[in-house]
Image: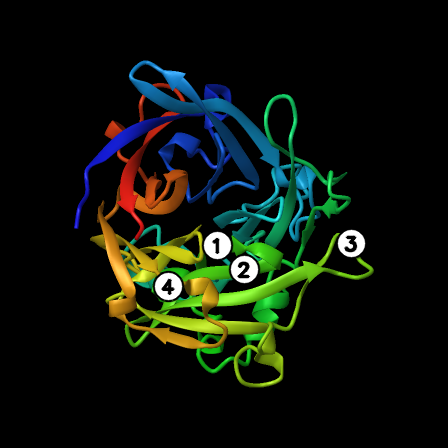
Amino acid sequence: MRLPKRRVRLQFNPAADLLPSGKRLSDGMSAAASIADTLWLTHDETISIERLRAEKSRGGIRYASHRRFDLQDLIALPALANRRGGPAAEADLEGIAIGDGYLWITGSHSVVRSPVKQPAGAKAIAALAKVSRDGNRFLLARLPMHDSAEGPVLVKEFRASDGRTLRAARLPGGRKHDALTRLLRTDPHLGPFLAIPSKDNGFDIEGLAAAPGGRLFLGLRGPVIDGWACVLEILVAEHSRRKAELVLRKLRNGGSSGRRSNRYRKHFLDLGGAGIRDLCLAGRDLLILAGPPMRGEGKAHVHRWKSALAVGKDSMIGQPNLAKLLELPYGETKNHPEGIAIVAQRGHRALLMAIYDSVEKDSRVGDGAMWATLHTLALR
């Protein structure tokens, strides 16, 4: 069902709006997370995190006071700046979440097909066969969040008031794979899809939720297998010796069957053939933004997987356990709902923000600004 919505302005620094690729931040974002009055955003063609803060404006609130955090200042990226002095390759950042004092981020971990520039002839046909693994897509990392006079900032390391030392770190890997995709190569469900481009129902992470203790949920846009979408669950911890490195730990109560796969679980969800575009924790529940797994027009819905954190083994979750809370329009080429974040909650009512990618001109307002939508949900 569609519920009443209202719009909120996301105001970026106009001087930082234009990206090296020629696109703009205000063209659309790929993922969002919120804590207190702060909104954290990613764009899939950058290697940075954008921070906005809520402030009063005429008729309500807007998010502004834009600050950018370059990932190169915080962690060692798999692909650094190119030899010609240009910027480091994009990370295709598709997931962002907050947990345990960290901002967690993930790239898509996907294979890319070369775009067809001229849709006719032998060259175009040959281009359809070209796929690559490159850039910083194979990235899963955590970044310490430190309170400052101007609000929370991302740092390499600091000592918290509880005595913990929080450090920036990432899973080991390079431009073509990381510890996660190496682990999944022999998985009977996901392994065969690792070499297929994301837009062709290949392996593609597009959602991230962080539970306490380094327990992460990764929502997959693809593959959708026989109509079933997949949430991948892992447990991540700091390496005992290499402090800037994360490792995949064995899951409590075990993972999937097999010795290698006890470090992950698979949850298959009946979302009516849709893939997962984002995840968001709501207490012990998981909110799921679902949309078309491949190109084309469709619908986007927000589902609620009740008591998702209580599931301790591989699972198949049917539609009766995935309540549909909200419907969002999904254009064929524009206005794609790409991220959700709870920005306020009181009792069983939550204010959910939806952010969009590839927005139409009427969704951009002034220099460096775009609209997001707010929706009131009843979580009972």
Identify the amino acid type marked 4: Leu
Colour mapping used in the image: rainbow
Q: Residue at x 45, y 23 (%)?
A: 64
Label 3 belongs to which residue? 243
Q: Residue furthest bottom?
A: 258
Label 1 belongs to which residue? 208
Label 4 belongs to which residue? 128
- Neighbours of disc 2 within 10 Å: few (<14), some (14-19), many (20+): many
Identify the amino acid type marked 3: Lys
Q: Cβ–Cβ below 8 Å for labels 1 and 2?
A: yes
Q: Residue furthest front?
A: 347
Left or right: residue 313 compared with residue 370: right
Q: Position of residue 229 (x, y in %)?
A: 35, 68
Secondary structure beneath disc 1? strand
- Label at residue 216: 2
Identify the amino acid type marked 2: Leu
Left or right: residue 258 compared with residue 173: left
Q: Position of residue 63 (x, y in %)?
A: 42, 25
Secondary structure beneath disc 4? loop
Q: How far is the residue under mark 1 from the one under mark 2?
A: 7 Å
**In front of the other: label 1 or label 4?**
1
- Neighbours of disc 3 within 10 Å: few (<14), some (14-19), many (20+): few
Left or right: residue 260 compared with residue 208: right
- Quadrant in the picture for residue 336: top left
Which numbered disc, 2 or 4, marks the residue that appears first in the sequence?
A: 4
- Neighbours of disc 4 within 10 Å: few (<14), some (14-19), many (20+): few
